[in-house]
Amino acid sequence: MATPLSDTGRALLDDKNFATIATINPDGSPQTSVVWVKRDGDDLLMSTVEGRKKDKNLRRDPRVSVSVFDLQQPYSYIEVRGTATLTTEGGRELIDELSRKYRGEDYTADGPDAVRVVIRLTPEKVTGYAS
Amino acid sequence: MILNDAVRALLDARNYAVLCTTNPDGSPQSSVLWVARDGDDLLFSTLRDRRKELNLRRDPRASVTVFDLADPESYAEIRGTTTITEDVGLVVGHRLSRKYTGQDHALPAEGQVRVVLRVTPTKVTGHVA
């Protein structure tokens, strides 16, 4: 069941705020990392590379929690929970779009063999002061 | 020493931490919190019976991410094990509140118990780790 984002939640995601994505390790413990994020409607789009820890974790257990707070006003934040879907289609385009959003230029740091993965999160539960 | 100087500096500055715990169904839960450092341990303040406190009582394994507000690509992930104690005298609550707001922490409401989440690191990764 998709849950809509609030206008404040959408604004948080549209600004150049960084997201923390939490996944579950094979032993059941949590893992977090800092990622770029953009919005597609009410879905959150993030990028990773095939074989990275969060990619492997999400293929085993796609349940995810993403926190985003306003860098200027950290009390304004949302936690978005849901089940992620992973695709390689559009992976290169997404990392370039994210890089242009955050750095103003295409992404050039990947090695030639890196396979970019799109992490798409449709919010099922949204909490936080800006939810 | 498990935390290097760069990670210590991240934690000592007024950066915000995301603390991740696991729900009873095994899914992740995260929230944005103030953080302070005591040696190599990370200190957080919350209320008894909040979701994260219930989760950590059941499974004390936590993952904490902290990044530099002025340079978010400088970050660390700190994984560790949590111990929970009552914040007697609001020592940690006041310390955190003074760090981030310059003022004492609000007193807990009637019936609320403020607790300290102490995360002892077992693994540190990230661009400044």
Image (tube, rainbow, N blue to C red):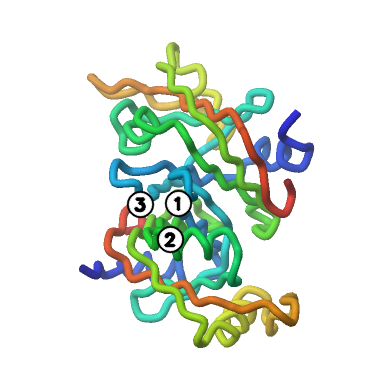
Instruction: For marks 3 and 1, give the one nearer the viewer.
Output: 1
Q: Amino acid at mark 3?
A: Tyr
Q: CA distance from mark 2 to mark 3?
A: 31 Å
Q: Residue at x 61, y 41 (%)?
A: B78
Answer with mark 1 or mark 2, whichever residue precedes in sequence: 1
Q: Are marks 1 and 2 in contact (CB under 8 Å)?
A: yes
Mark 3 residue crowding within 10 angstroms, few (<14) / some (14–19) / many (20+):
few
Q: Position of B125 compared to A41: left or right?
A: right
Q: Position of A123 compared to A101: left or right?
A: left
Relative depth, front residue between B76 and A16? B76
Res B16 → quadrant: top right
Q: Amino acid at mark 2?
A: Arg
Relative depth, front residue between B49 and B26? B26
Q: Are marks 3 and 1 in contact (CB under 8 Å)?
A: no
Residue A60 locus on image (x, y percent): 43, 60
Residue A93 locus on image (x, y percent): 57, 87
Res B37 → quadrant: top right
Q: Residue at x 37, y 23 (%)?
A: B114
Same chain assignment for discs 2 and 3: yes
Q: Quick one: SS at disc 2?
A: helix
Mark 2 residue crowding within 10 angstroms, few (<14) / some (14–19) / many (20+):
few
Specify the subunit that label 3 lies on. Answer: A
Q: Quick one: SS at disc 1?
A: strand
Residue under numbered circle 1: A24
Q: CA distance from mark 1 to mark 2?
A: 9 Å
Residue A112 locus on image (x, y percent): 74, 82
Answer with mark 2 or mark 3, whichever residue precedes in sequence: 2
Residue under numbered circle 3: A129
Answer with mark 3 or mark 1, whichever residue precedes in sequence: 1
Residue under numbered circle 2: A60
